[in-house]
Image (spheres, rainbow, N blue to C red):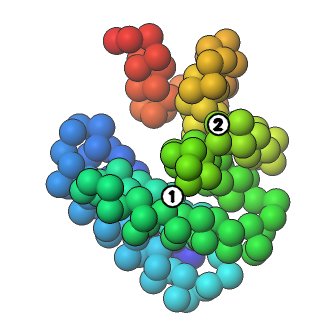
């Protein structure tokens, strides 16, 4: 359990470094998060949340990849980790959120689908209506789909749940062109 929580912290550290445009530190923290969650899975292979986190980390690793080689290397891992998570807990909000991010971030030819992303993220918010990050991802997906009003509503819900959320605020700023 503690290794899973540590991996989440390292994942957030990676995000913070990315927001500060420090790619080297962001990738280092991401690698640490991946190693830590893999250790967590060695201790408890039946953790759907840990498999979902690893899927998300693999997806983020693609963004750090060089050229077109990162997608083929890590993309199948995203899919297999999310499938394993769904087997273990088919009603987990974190699993649906991770699956939504998978659909959102993958290119269409590799299973990306904005409509499926929105559907999975909405399902996640129905299961856990208090998980603010999922509303931010839902806003991103809705915006990509062209639903600005829905995106703003999702962002407002995220900010209502977590008024100090840097993720929600930066997503809102990027939408307004600031």
Q: Residue at x 68, y 81 (%)?
A: 46
Q: Residues within 10 Å of mark 1 (few under 14, many from 20)?
A: many
In this view, the mark in front (1 or 2): 2
In depth, the one of 87 and 73 nearer the eye is 73
Q: Residue at x 63, y 25 (%)?
A: 145
- Residue farthest to the bottom, as pictured: 43
In depth, the one of 168 and 160 nearer the eye is 168
Name the N-terminal-most of marks 1 and 2.
Answer: 1
Position of the N terminus by quadrant = bottom right
- Residue farthest to the front, as pictured: 109
Position of the C terminus by quadrant = top left
Q: Quadrant of residue 158?
A: top right
The residue carrying mark 2 is 114
Q: Residues within 10 Å of mark 2 (few under 14, many from 20)?
A: many
Examine the rendered structure and indicate whether residue 21 appears above or below residue 9. Answer: above
The residue carrying mark 1 is 56
Examine the rendered structure and indicate whether residue 104 appears above or below residue 152. Answer: below
Q: Secondary structure at mark 1?
A: helix
Q: How far apart, in angstroms, are the residues tagged by discs 1 and 2?
A: 17 Å
For residue 67, side relative to residue 82 (left or right): left
Q: Residue at x 66, y 17 (%)?
A: 147
Q: Residue at x 68, y 69 (%)?
A: 83
């Amino acid at each position: 359990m503690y290794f899973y929580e540590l991996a989440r912290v390292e994942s957030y550290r990676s995000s913070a470094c990315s927001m500060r445009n420090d790619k080297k530190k962001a990738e280092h923290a991401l690698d640490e998060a991946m190693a830590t969650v893999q250790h967590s899975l060695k201790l408890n292979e039946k953790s759907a949340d840990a498999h979902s986190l690893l899927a998300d980390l693999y997806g983020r690793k693609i963004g750090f990849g060089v050229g077109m080689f990162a997608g083929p290397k890590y993309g199948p891992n995203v899919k297999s980790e999310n499938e394993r998570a769904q087997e273990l807990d088919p009603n987990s909000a974190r699993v649906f959120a991770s699956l939504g991010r998978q659909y959102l971030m993958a290119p269409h030819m590799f299973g990306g689908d904005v409509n499926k992303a929105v559907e999975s993220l909405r399902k996640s918010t129905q299961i856990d209506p208090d998980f603010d990050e999922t509303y931010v991802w839902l806003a991103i997906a809705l915006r990509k789909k062209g639903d600005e009003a829905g995106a703003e509503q999702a962002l407002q819900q995220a900010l209502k749940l977590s008024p100090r959320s840097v993720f929600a605020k930066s997503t809102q700023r990027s939408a307004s062109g600031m």
